[in-house]
Amino acid sequence: MDLLSEVIRTVRVGSATGRVIRQSGPTGIRFPAFDGSGIHILLRGSCWLITEDEEPVALRPGDVVLTSSGAAHGLSRVPHPLAGLPLVDMRPLPPAPGPFDFEFLCGCYQLQHGHAPQYLRVLPDLIAVSPDYAAHPELRALVELLKADRSGGAQMGAGATLPALLDLVLVHVLRQWHEQQGAAGWPDTHDPAIAAALREIHEHPEQPWTVERLSEVAGLPRTAFTRRFTTEVGRPPMSYLIGWRLSRGARLLRETDAPLSSIARQVGYANEFAFSGAFSREYGVSPSRFRAGQAAVRGQEAASGTG
């Protein structure tokens, strides 16, 4: 299974929004915490990535910030406490005219229910990437397309182009970050025993996994496996397995018309009732209501793209 493709397909359970933002003045803007994932791409000027707990990070043109699971953050021309930055206006407004200190693309997938996909939740909350555009000119072309798409106001087909472009940009940014980290797979683990267990979870969520069976895959005693898995991944094995199964279930609800009984079997639940109960606890809504909501979002995106 192509894990990166699975991540992007799972992200699509949210509705896509985006715009070009130009900022001037001594401070910047603050993005509150939200349910979803997003990116910023600095186009011109320089600024600082501001978070609640970490030191500010200097950004230069071309740098990309990935908000893996909607953590609060800010962008400012000078280092500044996050709480003191004014909140951003994310309505689909055209870029402000006149002089500005920095300009950036902002795009995100806003989730109506549940959390960011399992993979993104185990990444750092905020990731700053300096892509190698010389080695990957296709990313620069995608950024230009996304900028043009978000700078021209309402256009025919916008409801289709924005999610497609965001998908592609996210693929390239995650791929480059992954290469720069030198990691072999997500979550970022250098423990081959834990990596083996994760591979089985990702590729075969329908299997009746238990901690005992996963520890056998890893070649470790159960207690040692549970301890090492939790340390490496940040969640106990069964908690991670449930999250992965339900993220895939959410994608299948969005992308297919398969009955709940079929989806339940594909993601490791004995029947639709067990799947529905687990899904409702995770997403706060039943699978049928989630599917209906996703269909409504797609309809709104299609309508907004007709001009």
Image (cartoon, helix red, strand yellow):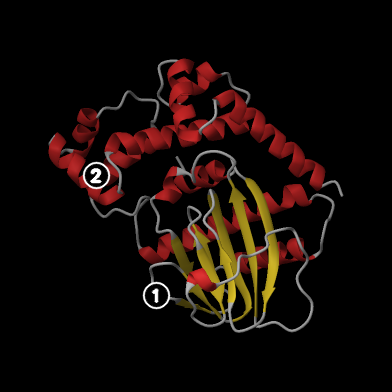
> How crowded is the residue under tag 2: few (<14 C-alpha within 10 Å), some, or many (20+)?
many
Q: Is residue 226 above or below residue 183?
A: above
Position in image of residue 24 (x %, y %)? 67, 81
Left or right: 178 with respect to 210?
right
Q: Say which quadrant the N terminus sits in.
A: top left
User: Between 280 and 104, which is closer to the camera in this rendering?
Assistant: 280
Earlier in the chain: of badge 2 and badge 1, it is 1
Q: Is residue 166 left or right of residue 203?
A: right
Q: Secondary structure at mark 1?
A: loop
Residue 172, quarter of picture:
bottom right
Q: Is residue 177 visible?
A: yes
Spatial distance from mark 2 to mark 1, Cα to Cα?
29 Å
Image quarter of residue 144: bottom right
The answer to whether residue 130 is seen in the rendering is no
* Residue at image mark 2: 229
Q: Nearer the viewer, residue 119 or 206?
A: 119
Of the pair 93 and 40, the residue shown nearer to us: 93
Above-or-below relation of 81 to 206: below
In the structure shown, which secondary structural element does the residue marked by tag 2 occupy?
A: helix
Q: Position of residue 32 (x, y in %)?
A: 54, 59
Would you place residue 167 above or below residue 30 in this image? Answer: above
Residue drawn at x 38%, y 68% as measured from the top left: 53
- How many marks the image carries: the answer is 2
Residue 168 in percent (x, y) is at 61, 55
Q: Amino acid at mark 1?
A: Glu
* x 40%, y 24%: residue: 268
How far across and how far down the image is residue 33, in percent? 52, 56
Location of mark 1 (residue): 55
Q: Residue at x 68, y 60 (%)?
A: 90
Give the residue drawn at x 47%, y 68%. 128
Looking at the rendered structure, the kind of residue marked 2 is Phe
Q: Residue furthest right?
A: 307
